[in-house]
Image (tube, coloured by chain):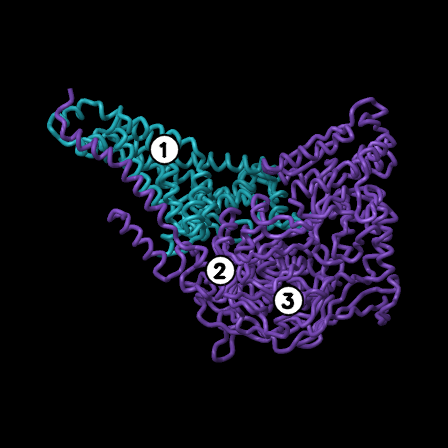
Chain colours: A cyan, B purple
Amino acid sequence: MIAYIVRRTLYAIPILIGVNLFTFALFFWVNTPDDMARMHLGLKRVTPEAIAKWKQERGYDKPLLFNSGAPGATEKLGDTIFFEKSIRMFVFDFGAADDGRDIGREIKARMLPSLALALPVFVVGLLVHITFALLVAFFRATYIDFWGVVLCVAMMSISSMFYIIGGQYLISKLWHLVPISGFQGGVDSAKFLALPVIIGVIGSLGAATRLYRTFFLEEINKDYVRTARAKGLSEVTVLFKHVLKNAMIPILTGAVVAIPFLFMGSLITESFFGIPGLGSYTVDAIRSQDFAVVRSMVFIGSFLYIVGLLLTDLSYTLVDPRIRLG
Amino acid sequence: MLPLFPRTALAAVAFVAGCSGAPWNDPYPAHDAGANTLYSSFSERPKHLDPVQSYSSNEITFTAQIYEPPLQYHYLKRPYTLIPLSAERVPEPQYFDKNGQRLTGDASQRDIAHTVYEIHIKRGITYQPHPAFARDREGKLLYHGSSGDVLAGKFKLSDFPQVGTRELNARDFEYQIKRLAHPRLHSPIFGLMADYIVGLKEYAEVLKQANQELTRSGVKNPWLDLSQYPLAGVEVVDDYTYRIKIAGQYPQFAYWLAMPFFAPVPLEVDRFFGQPGMMEKNLTLDWYPVGTGPYMLTENNPNRIMVLERNPNFHGETYPGDGESGDAEAGLLKDSGQPLPFIDKIVYSLEKEGIPRWNKFLQGYYDGSGIASDTFDQAVQLSSQGEAVVTEAMQKQGIKLSTSVAVSTFYIGFNMLDPVVGGPSERARKLRQAISIAVDYEEYVSIFQNGRGIPAQGPIAPGIFGYRDGEQGINPVVYDWDGSRPRRKSIEAGKKLLAEAGYPDGIDAKTGTPLVLNFDVTARSVDAKSALDWMRKQFEKLNIQLVVRDTDYNRFQDKIRKGNAQIYEWGWHADYPDPENFLFLLHGPQSKVKTSGENASNYENPEFDRLFEQMKNMPNSPERQAIIDRMIELLRHDAPWLWGFHPTDYALYHAWYSNLKSNKISYNIVKYHRLDTGMRGQKRREWNQPVLWPVGILLALLGVFTAPAVIAYRRRERMGART
């Protein structure tokens, strides 16, 4: 297994370089360093000298990918924006944002609020979705199953914005039960997180239930389930002990890969509920054309995705002893 | 009666959220209830809080409460009037000829070689408590220049246990002016000031060299001690007096002295933040402002919250005793002579989305609010006299409406370098005039601005010297005076001009092809599509086809810079209340294409440019007005812009928030505001009683729907094996 982990880790390096190159190409295809300088320096009284100074200070006055004027081959590739801005990220040194503030420190500060929202949504959501899916599967081919699926399809068809705005309107505006937006640390965070967590769980209920129901129905008709029932086990035992365990592999595929992304935050939810997480950090960086932050967040995202996939593979061995990684 | 679980859950929620007696949906800590705190919001995190760099309104909102430049605007008087802030009095410019001989005030512009502003600052002003001023028993600065141990384990200002202060002196103002030229700072006004402050341009070169030498030593971001490098244009006379030397004459310079760019920055503070390792910890002056003003920044978390608290060392100021007519009747002079500030603390919360911001205002959690288009009808209605008033629902809550015309203009410009719409030819001018008549801004303001704006007759906004109201002020190219108000000329007049321009009925008489024009706009929301469709229809009135070229802001700016746009839309908000700050947008030498200036239309008219040079240095007088009238006349004739409209700002305030007078030029106004926190607490509780019955119904419904499933489950469990 160690060899497998090492191999996968080594695979990650070219993937991260590729992702970084792709991000770099996309970003600078849309924005030039001049655009970035103008965005940063504001809209009024921006002189060409100020733009040149800004670029020089941040190293954006160099060629993008290839410095034909540099003396040696190493310098030709090394003395470029891409190389200088990318190489340090591989040791998780993200440098400073275009406004001069340390990105690593900002990420650390914002990770917790993101996690405070995403973790309950993930855990509570997983429990609720699995339970609901098991319930629907239990009543398969009955009116409960039929209307449950109809409800799921209806819920899937509704935009997440509807849940957010509707939830804020009902629970905060009309019923005055929790604050409509905002965030505080510590115990006080509970009253701010209650609404986004409820909305997060309900908003994904339709899609997740349908997916899990399919997994369960696939298992529920297998021979071992019939055998379990024939043994006289209760339906609850059959579902939770046997069916759930065997349906865990596809569930794990989706769930474990999502775990690293809990740190990355939710773009829309954080923005609407005023939660100072990494999702809103990324959105702000895109809006303000802060390449330093965008590339850092993309890098972390791709890194976490690779970690998530590795964890998924490892988790297979835990839930299914037949699987061996080599 | 509710089942046991829901009752327990509700009780738990009630305990967690409401054990203090505060409403459950109160977003603020319970211990803040009843505090003399103003609650406001910000939608975009400020980029700079360093007074040498901060320029946009979302930054000056904070810095203006903290820093005290020499001058400020009178809170109540209109037109806007400069009064002293940290200065003893408003400085009178002293004029000198090229031999250094003092000239009298009525000296001709040609004789004036330079102007000197001698500024006397008030005695006894001290800085807010700050670790940069902390000293040990021997009087040495505690956190300066010693070993790195001093900074170990310190990541925010509150990690420094000792604070100190000192008296403001003239060297602090000198130091800040030097910082305008700092090679690692990007002051947006450096380019402008380098043209006026004697020696500032050369000073930037000196500092650049010095910075390069220091950088060569290998230190990252080394501190540059500006006190080592003298600046010719600034002289410290004594601890309380300094002089600024301006090349030639620049009367608008006094307005700049009311902006944070000219606020004092002490050397100790710059040195404190310039120590190695500070920047890596985000400990910079750009992040932690240090001033002498009524407030100091005590929490800087632009991801969530910014908190300003009363500066315990504030030197004191009193509420103004006079204003303009109507202020006394409006209750704005009740606090005359009272010490400022009235509010202890200001909490700005990050609120990116309009819906939560609006609802929090309605719930009483923000003390004031703007009005978005989608909430306009909910908030404002027109009275029988056509006056904007708050709706009945708002009245019931005691919400007040404040309206004021902004010192801004939104316009559509023609690129004067364009071969079709640009240039001084009769053909192009008549085409522009025809379009000016066709685009009905009265309709635009009514449909797309909810009536919040007045169609512009020229570039100068109301409230600024040079603006003329009534019949004298109308644009005769586009309007006729009907005895009481301007009336837009009929579209027939526009068609006639179009035909005279060589495009009868929108067809180019030379080529026989339809006239097609391009309108460059920045990528906008789906909602803006209707406004663009409306614009197309305005051109269709003349049978002109308008092609909308929608791009992102980068590309748009690029087109404007290179002169590739044909017709474009843009806006301007005045820096200071002087006509020069509007008319320079059409000054030939400031052409965007030729000099990267602010004249985006690249308009050039020798007479206008000559008059501009003459007008810009004149004090407000009938002579200046006459010159401005002529300049406006030229502009209306040449029509380089569709003059667009001047927006009217609408703002809502709760009944407990008072001493409010709209001020579109200065930002240091929170010190004048007052709160009735008792009323606020009572109203918040009244408006935010938790409503529990829907939760009970939801839980009951859940029970009703779950019951059949439980019954079915039990029945199934009792069944035998399936057949």
Seen as rendered, the residue at the extreme left is: A231
Amino acid type shown at disc 2: Gly
Quadrant where the image shows the N terminus of chain A? top left
In the rendered image, residues at marks 3 and 1 fall on the same chain? no
Locate residue B262, reporting x and y percent: 66, 64
Q: Secondary structure at mark 1?
A: helix
Indicate the amino acid at tag 1. Gly
Q: Which residue is mark 3?
A: B332
Residue tagged 2: B277
B510 horizontally vs B463: left or right? right
Query: Marks 3/1: CA distance?
Result: 57 Å
Describe residue B343's horizontal placement relative to residue B491 as left or right: left
- Observer-side mark, 3 or 1, equals 3
Q: Is residue B171 left or right of residue A161?
A: right
Which chain is indicated by disc 3?
Answer: B
Image mark for residue A206: 1
Total numbered labels: 3
Residue at point 39% right, 36% down? A12
Judge the density around disc 1: few (<14), some (14-19), many (≥20) Cα neighbours within 10 Å.
many
Looking at the picture, does residue B336 appear above or below residue A84? below
CB under 8 Å between callouts 3 and 2? no
* Few, some or many residues within 10 Å of mark 2 (<14, 14–19, 20+): some
Q: Nearer the viewer, mark 1 or mark 2?
A: 1
Asked which quadrant contains residue A67, the reply is top right
Which residue is found at the position 61% from the left and 61% from the top?
B51
Pinpoint the chain carrying mark 1.
A
| Nearer-the-camera pick, B573 or B128 | B573
Which chain contains the residue that carries disc 2?
A: B
Query: Separation of disc 3 and disc 2 at Cα?
Result: 49 Å
Residue B326 seen anywhere in this rendered image of the structure: yes
